[in-house]
Image (tube, helix red, strand yellow):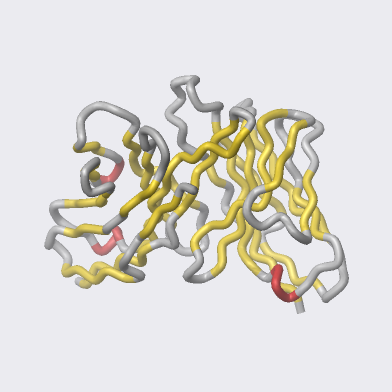
């Protein structure tokens, strides 16, 4: 069965410092990986995805993620954190659900707090 | 704006009551999903649909029902509400995998349901 693990419930980082939010996955076949962000009382918003190609993927709001096949990881990164980056971040992997259908399986989420 | 619209935004139900959560999308997406989000648990898939007239169970379908009579609408029905169904419910839609549309989901803003 496919799964996603986000080992940190919360990450605190000072404004201006680099940030990393960790994600590891388990899936059969080639992984399709995603990061979403959720601001308070809002739905999830797409940040970036890895389907194939370069291991470093760039997305919205200056975020990027590095795909590492040997470590089965897809960590989210940003060189310089902003207070406005404070939110809940979800990693997800596309999983086969049978009968030719696919769906996303989400991690439990990591709360990012950027301290002024 | 194009996207996924959920109604209502908030609802309080008494134990044993029933209700329907509405979800509509105007992007002509074939795939639609219902998730519930509980604190520290991430998102759990309740039901999904790959097109009008086709629905299937997700990870946590018990206590819920869905229908998909049109491409645009995917309502979620709660029969005999229980306190365990207190949660935030998100509807999402996507293009089918393989269409080149990016495989990402578009989420609605959610329905916060409390069962007392």
Position of A49 compared to B49: left or right?
left
Residue B88 visible in rendering: yes
**Could you say which quadrant of the image residue A17 lies in?**
bottom left
Evaluate whether residue A74 shows in this view.
no
Residue A92: horizontal and vertical position, in percent?
Answer: 42, 48
Residue occupying image coordinates x 22% and y 59%: A82
Which residue is drawn at the image coordinates 53% and 37% (left, top)? A96
Task: Name the residue nearer the viewer: A57 or A25.
Answer: A25
x, y percent for residue B20: 80, 54
Determine the residue positioned at 52% across, 53% down. Answer: A43
Give left or right: position of A89 versus A105. Answer: left
- Left or right placement of residue A17 versus residue A22 in this view: left
- Image quarter of residue A107: bottom left
User: In the figure, B9 relative to A93: above or below?
Assistant: below
Q: Can you say whether B18 is above or below A90 in the image?
A: below
Left or right: A109 as drawn, with respect to A97: left
State the residue in front, B72 or A100: A100
The image shows a total of numbered marks equal to 0
Indicate the position of residue B58 as horizontal and vertical percent values. Answer: 65, 49
Task: Name the quarter where the C terminus of chain A is drawn.
Answer: bottom left
Of all residues shown, which one is farthest toward the bottom?
Answer: B116
Furthest-top residue in this view: B99
Residue A88 in percent (x, y) is at: 39, 61
At 54% from the left edge and 45% from the top edge, which residue is drawn?
Answer: B107
């Amino acid at each position: 069965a496919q799964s996603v693990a986000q080992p940190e419930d919360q990450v605190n980082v000072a404004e201006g410092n680099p940030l990393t939010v960790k994600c590891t996955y388990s899936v059969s076949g080639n992984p399709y990986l995603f990061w979403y962000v959720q601001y308070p009382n809002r739905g999830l918003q797409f940040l970036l995805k890895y389907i194939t190609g370069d291991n470093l993927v760039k997305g919205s709001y200056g975020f990027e993620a590095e795909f590492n096949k040997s470590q089965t990881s897809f960590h989210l990164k940003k060189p310089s954190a902003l207070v406005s980056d404070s939110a809940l971040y979800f990693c997800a992997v596309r999983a086969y659900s049978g009968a030719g259908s696919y769906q996303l399986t989400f991690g439990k989420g990591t709360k990012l707090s950027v301290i002024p | 704006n194009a996207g996924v619209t959920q109604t209502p935004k908030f609802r309080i139900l008494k134990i044993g009551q029933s209700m329907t959560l509405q979800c509509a999308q105007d992007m002509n997406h074939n795939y639609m999903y219902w998730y519930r989000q509980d604190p520290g648990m991430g998102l759990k898939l309740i039901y999904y649909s790959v097109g009008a007239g086709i629905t299937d169970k997700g990870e946590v379908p018990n206590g819920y029902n869905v229908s998909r009579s049109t491409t645009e609408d995917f309502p979620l029905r709660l029969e005999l509400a229980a306190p365990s169904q207190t949660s935030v419910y998100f509807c999402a839609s996507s293009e089918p995998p393989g269409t080149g549309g990016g495989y990402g989901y578009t989420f609605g803003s959610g329905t916060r349901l409390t069962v007392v």
